[in-house]
Image (spheres, rainbow, N blue to C red):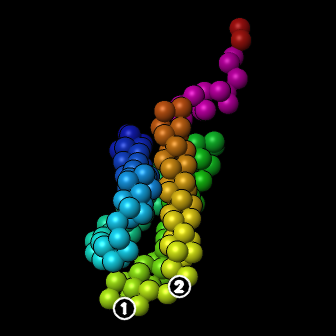
Amino acid sequence: MLIRPVQAFALLSTGLLAGAFGYGAVNVIYAFRTVPLDVRFTFHTALMQVNGVVMQTTMALAILASLLLAAVSRQVPRLLSAGAAVLALTSFLVTRFGNVPINGLIKQWAVGPVPAEHAAILQRWEMFHVVRTSAAFIAFLLVTVVVVAGDRFMKSRVAPVSA
């Protein structure tokens, strides 16, 4: 049946997205905070050049896989899968309209003057990162619930026939 490969695809893609953002939240952000600003800006710029393609692809796959899982599911699992797709889309939108514009500023700061309000802008970038990471993590949790307990949702909706 098609549902198992779709479930695996959804688990893998949402798990990769949550894991990548989580790694950034736990490790990269703290490393950024401990190095001198010029090193941070140079590394941030280099990292974002690579991350741009990788993370956009991962977000697109998470959205697609969650939608496919919704399409092959019914009732509660369908709603949870659709919710995961919305959350994966949220991570994309926050990235595109929150983090990416700030990445452009950081790229300029790596080679030019740094504005006095840079700390507030970097804090805003981190806040956007927490939002997109949380959305990706909850999407992964929803897909995990669908895969692990999806059959139980369906069985609990059907009343047993008594003799």
**Residue 10 picture location, percent across and down:** 42, 49
Q: Is residue 151 magenta?
A: yes
- Name which residue lies at 62% across and 49% down: 79
Question: What segment carries the magenta color?
Answer: 150-161
What residue is rendered at 69% in x and 17% in y? Answer: 161
Kindly identify the amino acid type of the residue bearing the numbered disc 2. Ala
Relative to 92, 36 lies left or right: left
Q: Quadrant of residue 124?
A: bottom right
Residue 105, x across and y down, in percent: 44, 85
Q: Which mark is residue 156?
A: none
Q: CA distance from mark 2 to mark 1?
A: 13 Å
Please say whether residue 38 is visible from this viewpoint.
yes
The residue beneath circle 1 is 112
- Name the residue located 50 percent from the left edge and 50 percent from the top edge: 137
Residue at which label 2 appears:
116
- Camera-side residue: 31 or 11? 31
Quadrant in which the C terminus appears? top right
**Image quarter of the N terminus:** top left
Query: Around disc 2, counting alpha carbons within 10 Å, would you say few (fewer than 14), some (14 to 19), or many (20 or more)?
Result: few
